[in-house]
Image (cartoon, grey):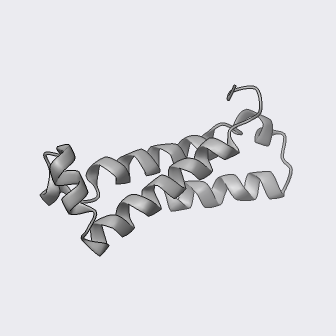
Protein backbone atom coordinates (compact mmCIF):
# COMPACT_ATOMS: atom_id res chain seq x y z
CA UNK A 1 0.00 0.00 0.00
CA UNK A 2 2.81 2.39 0.89
CA UNK A 3 4.67 1.65 -2.36
CA UNK A 4 1.47 2.19 -4.33
CA UNK A 5 0.93 5.55 -2.64
CA UNK A 6 4.56 6.52 -3.31
CA UNK A 7 4.19 5.65 -6.99
CA UNK A 8 0.99 7.67 -7.27
CA UNK A 9 2.71 10.62 -5.62
CA UNK A 10 5.48 10.50 -8.21
CA UNK A 11 2.93 10.39 -11.01
CA UNK A 12 1.34 13.55 -9.63
CA UNK A 13 4.69 15.30 -9.03
CA UNK A 14 5.94 14.56 -12.55
CA UNK A 15 2.60 15.77 -13.96
CA UNK A 16 2.25 12.86 -16.32
CA UNK A 17 -0.88 12.51 -18.45
CA UNK A 18 -1.63 9.40 -16.44
CA UNK A 19 -2.25 11.56 -13.35
CA UNK A 20 -5.77 12.46 -14.50
CA UNK A 21 -6.71 8.80 -14.83
CA UNK A 22 -5.41 7.69 -11.45
CA UNK A 23 -6.56 10.61 -9.32
CA UNK A 24 -9.13 8.44 -7.51
CA UNK A 25 -6.63 5.76 -6.53
CA UNK A 26 -4.78 7.92 -3.99
CA UNK A 27 -7.81 8.73 -1.79
CA UNK A 28 -9.25 5.25 -2.35
CA UNK A 29 -6.10 3.68 -0.90
CA UNK A 30 -6.33 5.90 2.17
CA UNK A 31 -10.03 5.14 2.64
CA UNK A 32 -9.46 1.40 2.35
CA UNK A 33 -6.50 1.58 4.73
CA UNK A 34 -8.55 3.54 7.27
CA UNK A 35 -11.51 1.16 7.08
CA UNK A 36 -9.22 -1.86 7.37
CA UNK A 37 -7.56 -0.43 10.47
CA UNK A 38 -10.86 0.51 12.11
CA UNK A 39 -12.18 -3.03 11.85
CA UNK A 40 -9.06 -5.22 11.95
CA UNK A 41 -6.45 -3.36 14.02
CA UNK A 42 -7.35 -5.09 17.30
CA UNK A 43 -8.92 -8.43 16.44
CA UNK A 44 -8.54 -9.72 19.98
CA UNK A 45 -11.06 -7.10 21.07
CA UNK A 46 -13.91 -8.35 18.81
CA UNK A 47 -16.91 -8.82 18.79
CA UNK A 48 -17.67 -5.22 19.48
CA UNK A 49 -20.65 -4.13 21.54
CA UNK A 50 -21.27 -0.65 22.90
CA UNK A 51 -20.31 -1.62 26.48
CA UNK A 52 -17.18 -3.33 25.29
CA UNK A 53 -16.33 -0.49 22.90
CA UNK A 54 -16.31 2.14 25.65
CA UNK A 55 -14.27 -0.15 27.89
CA UNK A 56 -11.79 -0.87 25.08
CA UNK A 57 -11.19 2.80 24.41
CA UNK A 58 -9.77 3.08 27.91
CA UNK A 59 -6.86 0.97 26.60
CA UNK A 60 -4.34 3.51 25.18
CA UNK A 61 -3.13 1.16 22.44
CA UNK A 62 -6.64 0.46 21.13
CA UNK A 63 -7.52 4.14 21.34
CA UNK A 64 -4.39 5.05 19.38
CA UNK A 65 -5.20 2.53 16.63
CA UNK A 66 -8.78 3.74 16.28
CA UNK A 67 -7.86 7.44 16.28
CA UNK A 68 -5.16 6.97 13.65
CA UNK A 69 -7.52 4.87 11.52
CA UNK A 70 -10.15 7.62 11.67
CA UNK A 71 -7.52 10.24 10.74
CA UNK A 72 -6.41 8.23 7.69
CA UNK A 73 -10.03 7.68 6.69
CA UNK A 74 -10.75 11.39 7.05
CA UNK A 75 -7.69 12.30 4.99
CA UNK A 76 -8.85 9.98 2.24
CA UNK A 77 -12.30 11.58 2.22
CA UNK A 78 -10.81 15.08 2.12
CA UNK A 79 -8.58 14.14 -0.82
CA UNK A 80 -11.45 12.91 -3.01
CA UNK A 81 -12.02 15.09 -6.08
CA UNK A 82 -14.63 17.82 -5.63
CA UNK A 83 -17.28 16.21 -7.80
CA UNK A 84 -17.47 12.99 -5.78
CA UNK A 85 -18.27 14.31 -2.31
CA UNK A 86 -21.46 16.32 -1.93
User: From the viewer's perspective, is residue 77 above or below residue 75?
Assistant: above
- The answer to which image quadrant residue 22 occupies is top right
Q: Give the percent coordinates (x, y) of residue 71.
A: 53, 57
Residue occupying image coordinates x 63% and y 61%: 6
Name of the residue lying farthest toward the bottom = 60
Q: Is residue 38 left or right of residue 73?
A: left
Work out whether residue 57 or residue 35 is closer to the camera in this orientation and state it: 57
Q: Could you say which is closer to the camera, residue 26 or residue 14? A: 26
Q: Nearer the viewer, residue 10 or 26?
A: 26
Where residue 80 sits: x, y (%)?
68, 38
Position of residue 32 in the picture relative to residue 14 (left or right): left
Q: Is 27 drawn above or below residue 63 in the view shown?
A: above
Q: Does 14 sit left or right of 57 as displayed?
A: right
**Residue at 29% across / 58% down in the picture?**
41
Can you give x and y, in whole percent of width and height, for residue 47 in the image? 13, 45
The number of callouts visible is 0
Q: Quadrant of residue 18?
A: top right
Residue drawn at point x = 56 percent, y = 40 percent: 28
Point out residue 30 in the picture as x, y percentages from the top left corner: 54, 49
Residue at the image point whose x is 36% and y is 54% from the top: 37
Rendered view: 75 above or below 59: above
**The C terminus lies in quadrant:** top right
Amino acid sequence: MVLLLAGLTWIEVLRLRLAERVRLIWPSCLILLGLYNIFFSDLVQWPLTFDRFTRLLSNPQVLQHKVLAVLVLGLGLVELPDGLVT
